[in-house]
Amino acid sequence: MDYLSSMYIDNEMDLDDKRRFVEKVRSDHAFYSLTLELLAQEQQLRWQPMPVDRFEEKRWRPPVRSVLAHLFKPLGFAAAGFTVAVLMLAVLFQGPVAPLCTNRFVLFEPSANQVEVAGTFTGWQRIAMQRAGDSGYWQLELQIPTGEHRFAYILDGDRRMPDPTLAASEMDDFGGENSIINVEERI
């Protein structure tokens, strides 16, 4: 029964165990006396410095969380280092960035209420073009990386059409037609 008192003194009990302990102390006078003796010994030990040889006998064991943190901390550093190395390699081997060139898109479509352009240079996101007065022309200037690009005009939000002034075009995977433009750096 003295192990129950020891567990109580060392705070190694959960609430149910503590409740049972208190009930046991209240009902068993011998147990009550033993627990008081152990508490008196514990109090003396806490007031006196522990001898070195006794300290070596009773080894301190870290809590489980501390052990897990000690084990996983190096793994976290390794993962962070690996991530930094991958990002550095991606930046180093990305290759040269294509220079940007200004390209002007012009479309004559007097019956349209809205004209947008979308292509590989916009990630196929639509960009609205501006009406050039009452002339029927729509225009937009964009900074585009050098190289070959595909694009199409979108009229009134749903009708796609290639650029009628460009000869190069191709069918896309959705049954539409895209214009092909080759943007070169101008000196």
Image (cartoon, rainbow, N blue to C red):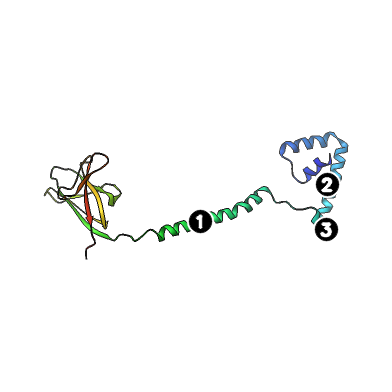
Question: Marks 2 and 3, how far apart in space?
Answer: 23 Å
Classify 10 Å Cα crowding around label 3: few (below 14), some (14-19), many (20 and above).
few
Which numbered disc, 2 or 3, marks the residue closer to the eye? 3
Quick check: marks 2 and 3 in contact, CB under 8 Å? no
Task: Find the residue positioned furthest to the bottom.
Answer: 187
The percent coordinates of residue 156 (x first, y second) are: 20, 41
Decide which of tag 2 and tag 3 comes sooner along the chain. 2
Residue at horizontal 82 percent and vertical 55 percent from the top = 54
> Circle 2 sits in a helix, a strand or a loop, which is it?
helix
Residue 116 visible = no
Q: Is residue 79 left or right of residue 109?
A: right
Q: Is residue 107 left or right of residue 1?
A: left
Q: Which residue is mark 2?
A: 39
Classify 10 Å Cα crowding around label 1: few (below 14), some (14-19), many (20 and above).
few
Q: Which mark, by number, is residue 172? A: none
Does 7 sit above or below residue 27? below
Name the kind of residue labelled 1 in the image.
Answer: Phe
Question: Marks 2 and 1, how far apart in space?
Answer: 53 Å
Classify 10 Å Cα crowding around label 2: few (below 14), some (14-19), many (20 and above).
some
In the foreground, 154 or 35: 154
Question: Marks 3 and 1, how far apart in space?
Answer: 46 Å
Q: Which residue is mark 3?
A: 53
The percent coordinates of residue 80 (x first, y second) are: 52, 55
Q: Kindly indicate the quadrant of the structure image that contains residue 177.
A: top left
Residue at horizontal 26 percent and vertical 56 percent from the top = 147
Residue 91 visible = yes
